[in-house]
Amino acid sequence: MSNVHVYRSVAHLNGMDLFHLDTRAEGPAILCLHGRWGRAETWFDFMQRYGDRYRVIAPDQRGHGLSGKPISRYTAEEMSADATALLDLLGIGSAIVVGHSMGGHVAGYLAAMNPGRVRALAILDKSANGPERPRSTPLEELEIDDPVTRDWPIPFGSRAEAQEYIKRAMESELSYQYFMNSLAESVNGYGMLFSEQAMTANIAYYSQWFDLLPRIECPVMLVRAKGGEAVPDEDFGKMRELIPDCMAFEMSDPDHNVHLADRGEFYRYFDEFLSAAGLTIASM
């Protein structure tokens, strides 16, 4: 694996700042979209793996990390518009798009609604199932309630206190590290970089998106964790049937962070997918 330099930048688009990582390499672009509560940092190992021959770009999506946190519904439509605007700003016409969890929904929406912008699509441990329609509560009346952090004693008094609490709250080391990526100090103590309003709205206005899948024209890779906790058998099968050009894999590890749990296994699947899509670039 190469020691790839990763550049950190902030782009001003759609009326807000969008922090992003970028390898700035020559070659096809890969846009990586993290999950809810996450950050671009979750893709750092992926960037080291592929960033010498692909231009790998990973933003902190709106409401997360160092990016802007406007009061909005945080729908796939809004977030995919941010992704498209970032590609436009960087002069990238089309990209391979990889989305984990919430990012998989955003990536799927982007591919379905803007087919010319997505050369290939990887949806990681995200089901298209959900409520038939989003909640009808007006945005200004939406009660802020992040189901993960609602009971956390934020701000934490010290980093050590935060580490101890988050470790107890998480079910795996990967989940612990996932949330620790968003821990930040302020004058009030230690809090999280993601917006509670963003998390609440993204959940409240989420609805199933099976109807988008037949509209995806590019090759698609579906990956789920062993056991199918996030993507049950019925959903996984339905997604495979609805996507015209689909490869599907199940990881041998049950952790939701499928691109991190067994990286060697995940990269084998992703390499196979790139090869089948005719997008393989030899390592330098």
Image (tube, helix red, strand yellow):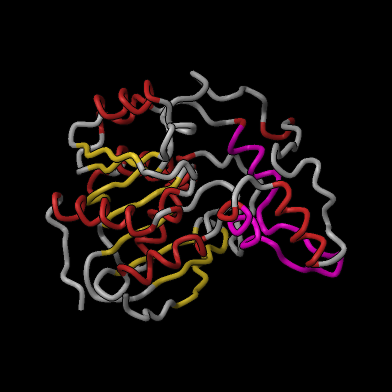
All told, the count of numbered labels is 0
Residue at 15 percent across and 50 percent down: it is 277
Residue 261: tell me if it is visible.
Answer: yes
Q: Is residue 143 positioned above or below 92 on the image?
A: above
Q: Is residue 173 positioned above or below 142 on the image?
A: below
Name the image quarter holding the C terminus: bottom left
Q: From this viewpoint, which residue is outermost toward the front?
A: 252
Residue at 32 percent across and 75 percent down: it is 1
Residue 41 is situated, as x and y percent measured from the top left of the image, at 51, 64
Dividing the picture into quadrants, the one containing residue 222 is top left
Q: Is residue 77 left or right of residue 71?
A: left
Residue 194, magenta (yes or no): yes
Residue 122 is situated, as x and y percent measured from the top left of the image, at 31, 47
Residue 5, magenta (yes or no): no
Q: Is residue 261 left or right of residue 278?
A: right
Q: Nearer the viewer, residue 65 or 177?
A: 177
Dividing the picture into quadrants, the one containing residue 90 is bottom left
> What span is in magenta?
176-203
Residue at 33 percent across and 59 percent down: it is 264
Q: Is residue 97 left or right of residue 133?
A: left
Residue 66 is situated, as x and y percent measured from the top left of the image, at 61, 64
Q: From this viewpoint, which residue is outermost toward the top?
A: 132
Residue at 12 percent across and 55 percent down: it is 278
Q: Nearer the viewer, residue 268 or 153?
A: 268
Q: Nearer the viewer, residue 93 or 176?
A: 176
Residue 63: tell me if it is visible.
Answer: no
